[in-house]
Each structure stands twice: as C-alpha cells, then as structure tokens.
Image: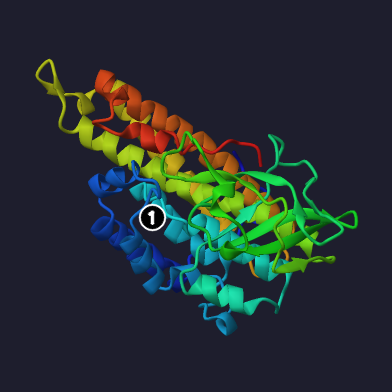
Amino acid sequence: MSLVGNTRIALSEEQAMLLDVAGEFCRDRAPREVVRAQLETPRGYDTDTWQALVELGWTGIALPESAGGSALGPGSVVPVLEAMGRAMLGTPFLSTTLAGQLLQRAAPGMHEEVLADIAAGAIATIAQLEDGDWGAAPRCHLDDDGLLVGTKRLVGDAHAAQHYLVVLTADGAPALALVHRDHFDRARVQGSELIDQTRRAATVDFTGVEPAALIAGPSVAPALRDLELLGALYVAAEAAGSAAACLDTTVDYLKTRKQFGKLIGSYQALKHPAVDILCAVDSTRSFVYHGATLVSDEALDRDAEIACRMAKAQATETLCHAGDRAVQFHGGMGFTDLVGLHYWFKKLPCNQC
C-alpha cells in the first residue's frame, strides 16, 4: 500500500511520553495472566486497573481543559490504544473516548458537566447500530411525548456505562439523545456474545426513555462522520499493538523451540516470514501515526479521512497476517488456549471503513 498526497508524520513529546508510560503501565498493572483472568468475568476488566488509568488522566487526554481534560488532541489517544492492544487489555477506554469526542464535536461548548464526568472516570458509550448495516439511517426517534422509540445493538460497554449518546433521527436529520444511567431500568440491557473476548457489548431497548438532552443541528452529521474516522484510527492503533504482540510471541518461540537438534528460528522458511511481519508492523505504525498527526479537534479534512481509512486497511491486513503466521508457527499448540494467540487474532477489525 502506497501513500500519496499529504505524507506528514510526527510524534510529539506528549505522544512519546504517553507511549512509554502506557507500555510500562500495561506491563506492571496488566500482565498477560491477569488480563486473561479478567476475560472470563462479566465486566471483562479490573475496576482497580480502570481507576488507575483514570488517575493517570487518560480519560481526559483529548477533552478540553475547561472540562478537566488535557486538551492534547484526539491523536494523543493513539499511543495509549497501541499499548492496550499489545497487552490485550480490555477496558471501556475506547467506548468512553469516542463518546467524549462525539459529544464535544456535536455540541461544542455545551454539556461540559458530562465531559468533566467522563474526564473524571465516568464510563460513556455510543448507541448507534440498529441492524447489520452501519451506513443505514437510524430509525430510532422521539415520539410526540418526547420519549425515545427504538432499540440499539452492539452498544459497547453498555452494562458499565453511565452516559449514553443515542443516535436518532429528528425532523429528518441525524440527532443525538443524551441518556444517563438512572433514566432507565438496567434490565433493558441484554448482553451480546462477541468474538473478541476483550470487549463487552449489549442490545439496549431505549423505548419509553426520556433523554436528558437532545442534541440537534448542523454540527451533528459532521460529528458522526468524524466519529467513524476516529473509530477507524483508534481500532487501527489497537490492531498495530496486537500485531506487534503476535510477532513478539512468535519470535520468542522461534528462539527457544528446537526441531532436529536446531532452533526452528534458524530456518529461512521461518525467518523470512517473521521479517515480513516486522516490516508490516512498522508500516502499520507509520500509517497509524500519520493519521494521529492529521486528526485534530476541528472537523477532519480530506487528508485526515484518507489517513484514517488507510491506517485501518493496513492494520487489518497486518494483524490478519501476523495472527495467522503466529498460530501456524506454533504448530498444533498454536490453536490452544495455553498459548492464547487467538485472543489477539479475534481482535481483527473488519475492513469496512
């Protein structure tokens, strides 16, 4: 894959620091055995780990200073997500970050009390999908009494969320309904079974729920478009970290497993594909940080859109290849839970964006 046009890429001091701190945090607080134990729990993550993450200020990285954030911009989230993808750490960080971005873009200067709550660690999510088509116009709407009518599928971290941004149609245009956790019965949240065990999602019935606020106007549609692009970039960052973890695990195995009296890593048939994966991982990180360089708090332009989509496409191909080779190079044991390669492989994002 080649890149034409804007090729600018930069790693700021803040991003470099976040990458180092996030990597150290994941190694110390979320070693692989701890993370895998959490995958079998209802939440999928450790609340103490989440609180430690909040205390580091990560939930406010891209939020404005007026809301208690650091105002480092949406690109500064990328190093944290890369480290999390490498550590297989599942938390509500992605859902919460995207919800914060959507809220501040769709309603600039408004609802800062909610943004402040998010920066302080409140979990937020976006309820968007209603069927299998991400591009379909939402059927969810408000009735004559101002109550929501509709059900949303695959709402990320819905069980733990304290704030929901529900995508709906109002007066023929896209709008957002802000719903708080205490506005409806939690029995309306029905868990969904996902292939990726590091994530949690649910189907939520919002029918009859009165929203705390309705966000409408010309800023909503561009905000939803930016949400799609930022989501693609953030998932690509996670995938880049996961692909790197697959490579590290594979190389460690190649350096210790012997066959016919020789380390299997000495055979060219395994060395060359490992180098191919390394090159693909480095290429993916370049695409991801190119995207992180171009995104900003302003509406994303055409260069940013191209960068985010290319990062997603490249990351998908890389993780697919790295995961497949990692499983195959481990032989029969590569398919077992003992090695755990499938956890990264199952994080493979679809290449739809």
Tell me which residue sits at (68%, 51%) in the image.
206
In the displayed structure, does residue 112 sit left or right of residue 280?
right
Residue 163 lies, in percent from the top left, at: 58, 63
**Residue bearing the label numbered 1:** 83
Amino acid at the residue labelled 1: Ala
Residue 298 lies, in percent from the top left, at: 70, 69
In this rendered view, identify the residue nearer to me: 271 or 201. Answer: 201
91 vs 280: above or below: below
SS at circle 1:
helix
Residue 97 lies, in percent from the top left, at: 54, 62
In the displayed structure, does residue 229 sit left or right of residue 38?
right
Tell me which residue sits at (58%, 55%) in the image.
185
Tell me which residue sits at (43%, 73%) in the image.
57
Q: Pointer 1: residues within 10 angstroms few (<14), some, or many (20+)?
A: many
112 vs 319: above or below: below
In this rendered view, identify the residue nearer to me: 180 or 28. Answer: 180
In the displayed structure, does residue 225 sit left or right of residue 293?
right
In the displayed structure, does residue 229 sit left or right of residue 123?
right
Q: Quadrant of the C terminus?
A: top right
Tell me which residue sits at (45%, 67%) in the image.
15
Residue 131 lies, in percent from the top left, at: 70, 36
236 vs 66: above or below: above
Q: Residue furthest right?
A: 171
In this rendered view, identify the residue nearer to me: 269 or 190. Answer: 190
Q: Is residue 348 visible?
A: yes
Q: For residue 80, what is the image quadrant?
A: bottom left
Q: Quadrant of the N terminus?
A: top right
Q: Is residue 10 visible?
A: no
